Image: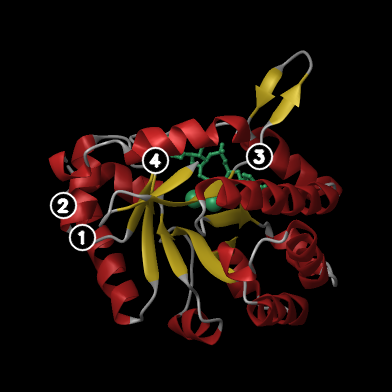
Amino acid sequence: QPQVSCITGDVIGMEALLRWNHPRRGSIPPSQFIPLAEATGLIVPIGEWAIRTACHEGKELQDAFGRELLIAVNLSPRQFRQKNLATQVGMALRESGLPPRSLEIEITEQTLMSSSATTNEALMKLRELGVKIAIDDFGTGFSSFSYLLQYQIDRLKIDQSFVRKAATDPNAAAVVRTIIAMSHGLDIKVIAEGAETREQVKFLMRRRCDEVQGFYFARPVSSYKLVETIERIEAMDTEEI
Ligand code: C2E
Ligand code: MG
Ligand code: MG
């Protein structure tokens, strides 16, 4: 799913979102298989595949557009318990040729706060590789300022629940404004998730949110449709919003 700059209207990158194409049941969303994959441990090989595929497809897109699009990949807490996570990521980067700064790992506040020795080490090693780190669904869990600073978080992703209500609910609007102000104060980028309407996008732009992602611009699409989707978004007149 493409991510769009609120300032230029350009696509700055995209988030990799898994789908399971089942022969009989069709496209199954991650909400139905990720929890199961986590419980069984299958999330480890699935996650490894997701990172490798995202790096390869991301590199192809970068070559097609001649610029450094950002590729964001979700990692569940379970994946941070593997000892060799950073090694795996390093290999995916080398094999694909994707520059490390073009890869962003999305973690939840839960992963950040679990702060086991293995999680800590993995995050530090990912940082050393030059990979970016974002906090997903920000505002729904618990995080501490010290962790935001310790791991030099690159981006906060404002959770959809606030974004959805921000244009109409003053309290949600205040939460969004506060997250944006806090991020900018800490020199962290901020992206809003789940923007579906023009009003929501307009609100985010007025509030100086850096980037936005949501159905208003594009639903998640198969990788072969990304080129035309990016071109369509960039042909939109964001001044008009
Ligand atoms: P997430 O990382 O917070 O991803 C955003 C979800 O919001 C995606 O759901 C996306 O399709 C949906 N979305 C984006 N824009 C809009 C919008 O404007 N309106 C609405 N209603 N929804 C929007 P999806 O693809 O079903 O993924 C659900 C969750 O599954 C993700 O939440 C993520 O936590 C997890 N997931 C997806 N891919 C992976 C993966 O490769 N590994 C792991 N560990 N988790 C993954
Ligand atoms: Mg995500
Ligand atoms: Mg999210």
Q: In the image, what residue occupies the spot 37% across and 46% down?
A: 161
Q: Residue at x 62, y 54 (%)?
A: 74
* Residue 125 in which image quadrant: bottom right
Q: Is residue 186 left or right of residue 115?
A: left
**Residue in front for this viewpoint, 118 or 74:** 74
Dot 4 or dot 2, earlier in sequence: 2
In the visual, does 74 lie left or right of 20?
A: left
Q: Which amino acid does label 4 sit on?
A: Gly
Q: Residues within 10 Å of mark 2 (few under 14, many from 20)?
A: few
Residue beneath disc 4: 214
Judging by the rendered image, the residue that carries numbered circle 2 is 170
| Label 3 element class | loop
Residue at which label 1 appears: 174
Disc 1 + disc 2, Cβ < 8 Å:
yes
Q: Which one is in front in this view, the residue at disc 4 or the one at disc 2?
A: 4
Between the residue at mark 4 and the residue at mark 1, the CA separation in whole angstroms equals 20 Å
**Residue type at tag 1:** Ala
Residue 18 is labelled as: 3
Q: Is disc 4's CB within 8 Å of ligand 1? A: yes
Q: In the rendered structure, which amino acid carries the disc numbered 2? A: Pro
Q: Earlier in the sequence, mark 2 or mark 3?
A: 3
The part of the image, by quadrant, that contains residue 19 is top right
Q: Give the crowd class for mark 4: few <14, some 14-19, many >=20 residues within 10 Å.
A: many
Marks 4 and 2, Cα distance to the nearest angstrom?
A: 21 Å
Secondary element type, mark 4: loop
Q: How far apart are marks 3 and 1 (CA)?
A: 32 Å
Q: Does the residue labelled 3 lie within 8 Å of ligand 1?
A: yes
Three-letter code for the amino acid on which mark 3 is drawn:
Leu
Between disc 3 and disc 4, whose residue precedes?
Answer: 3
Rendering coords of residue 67 (x, y %) = 49, 57
Say what secondary structure mark 2 lies in: helix
Q: Check the picture and name the quadrant holding the C terminus.
A: top left
